[in-house]
Image (cartoon, coloured by chain):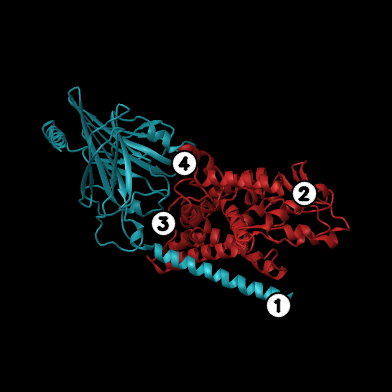
Amino acid sequence: MNLTIIRRLIQITAFIVMVYGIGLGGYYLADKLTSSLPALACAYDMQTADHCALISFQHQMAHHAAPVLSSGGSIIQAFLPTAITLGTFALLLIVLSKAFCGWICPLGFFQEVLNIIGQKLGLQQTQTLSKNITSKTRPVKWLIMIFLLFIFPLLAGFGVVGHELGDPFCRICPSRILTTLVTGDTKELVVDTSSMSYLILSVLATFLFGLMISIGLMVRQPFCRICPMLSLNTLFKKIGLVRLVKEAKPRCVKCGLCAKSCPMDIHEIHTDMENKDVIYPDCTLCGRCVEFCPDKDVLKIKYAFFPILSSDPGYFKKRKKAQTQWEKITLFGGHKK
Amino acid sequence: MKNKNMIFIASGLLSISHLCYAELLWSPKPKTPPITHKIHQTNHRIKEKIFYLNDNTHAHVKFITPSLNIKIVNAQKDSNKYILPKTGMDNYHALLAERKTDNTYESSLRYVSMRDKPSGYSPRKLIKKNKLPLEIVPEPMIREHWHFYTSNNHNYKVLFKGKPLADTWVTLNTSNGSNLDAKTDIDGMVSFILPEDFKNIQPGRRANQPEEFILRTVHISHGITYKTNFSAPYSVNPSHWNSNIGGILSLSIGFLSGIIIMRKHNRASRRAS
């Protein structure tokens, strides 16, 4: 039993609870539990939550902040609901920190499964994306957060842009298509011909979903790299109780196994020799860097002050062996040499 | 079929003969719309929710919150207009009207989604609460982002004094003029597919105003005729302007684009190494 197996079990449980909440525990579970998590188990999924922090922000901008400001209300009145949502979001992130992305998010889990399928199908895997590609993609999640979660919905509320842009992130979010499809509902896998804006947004959404699937078969977690949930989590990473700590040693310069194991291609986890806090904006706290660090106590996951997992040569050997054996198994070739 | 006709003829006669009340029925629109609707043009988060009771003579109106608190609502002066009070809670509230006479008991039920602070209660608590002697319960109740759409099948349970009422006729009428009927099964369940009866359908949800459907049922017990109805808005099914084939096509193009991108990327990586 290693950390990845424990994480997979938690991801499977979270996926089932969030996507099939009603089927599991009736409306009580759906209303009480899944609607309390800022999850990407989205409001369009009829089996589960009516709540996703990302849809709340967009609605608060378009349906509350803009009308209040237009009618002469104060900034406090306009943005109080957003502050409350951010507050509840912050509370959750104190408990989970960025581990929400790596341990709970259904869309993140789906992409990890896609990558496993790609590997088992024998497709050529891109284990590490170049620094050039990662540095280009990193600002996208911030732009998506600023413009699609806040600016466009606010402008739609003021009537500056069409109401179609009142919830633009939800319009293109792959989780909306995924979570409905896995409950047997095809109503979100559509092209909406009711207006040119809806047509463009719906084509973009379905195109992006297809793109995510094929790239996800060969690259680890492609959509996570541009997901605004990651940027929102980053805003609160300082207050989270889960911490990723590095005590760099001279051997670290030559090694770099931590960066190779990182599904988000965070090269800095290898190159940064000064910072102890190594939760970078792209980190999902999956813990793979700790698992694949061969040196004792160089990388640690801590919950508050309590160590959860520390890098260890013994653990590393077992984990590497398990990983090599797992990667040898392919669907069409039996055991890969 | 005979029984159904007898029940409805009997209930019709009763309603006509006894004090000549018109049916107790909630509607979101007045019979004669006022010339101006200024209140409806304001921000929809802060506008008041208004409903009209078809004939509110001797009717008692209750508004039940998700926490099951009951508020008595009175009509606006000399009218059948009811402005729903703010309860400080969001989610579905039940709007009930009841009228009792010597040998009839009429009721009308509607669920109204309110916007306010989170109620902290599941809407199931309210929907499962036995609110009327004869009640039509939507199974399941629509939730936020759910809508009653044409061509969709919806289930309802008919309860009499909290127990399923089997083998009872239920009629469905829409404001677009469709009429359907069906009998409850042994568990009191009945299903209706909402008819595709919108005319001049325009592309887009906002371009088509919702219409109303009404479910009615009657039950006679110990010489008292119980009549109830449940009304709700329903909308044009978005499949009129949403294309699944287009969605699959666009997804496929995205999928193929991803493969092309990755092939190019892998080729470039090989060359570089």
Callout 1: SS = helix
Callout 3: SS = loop
Q: Nearer the viewer, residue A201 or A191?
A: A191
Callout 2: SS = helix
Chain letter belonging to callout 4: A
Q: Amino acid at mark 3?
A: Lys
Please determine if labels 2 and 1 lie on a single subunit. Answer: no
**Of marks 2 and 3, the one in the foreground:** 2
Q: Amino acid at mark 4?
A: Gly
| Letter of the cyan chain | B
Q: Position of residue B238 (x, y in %)?
A: 36, 58
Chain letter belonging to callout 1: B
**Quick one: quadrant of the C terminus of chain A?**
bottom right
Answer whether labels 2 and 3 touch (C-beta < 8 Å): no
Q: Position of residue A38 (x, y in %)?
A: 57, 48
- State the residue position of label 3: A187
Q: In the image, A202: left or right of A87?
A: left
**Residue farthest to the top, as pictured:** B222
- State the residue position of label 4: A23
Q: Between marks 4 and 3, how big is the CA–CA gap?
A: 19 Å
Please determine if labels 4 and 3 lie on a single subunit. Answer: yes
**Of marks 4 and 2, the one in the foreground:** 2
Q: Between marks 2 and 1, how big is the CA–CA gap?
A: 34 Å
Callout 4: SS = helix
> Chain A appears what colour?
red
Chain letter belonging to callout 2: A
- State the residue position of label 1: B271
Relative to B98, is A15 above or below? below
- State the residue position of label 2: A318
Q: Between marks 3 and 1, how big is the CA–CA gap?
A: 43 Å
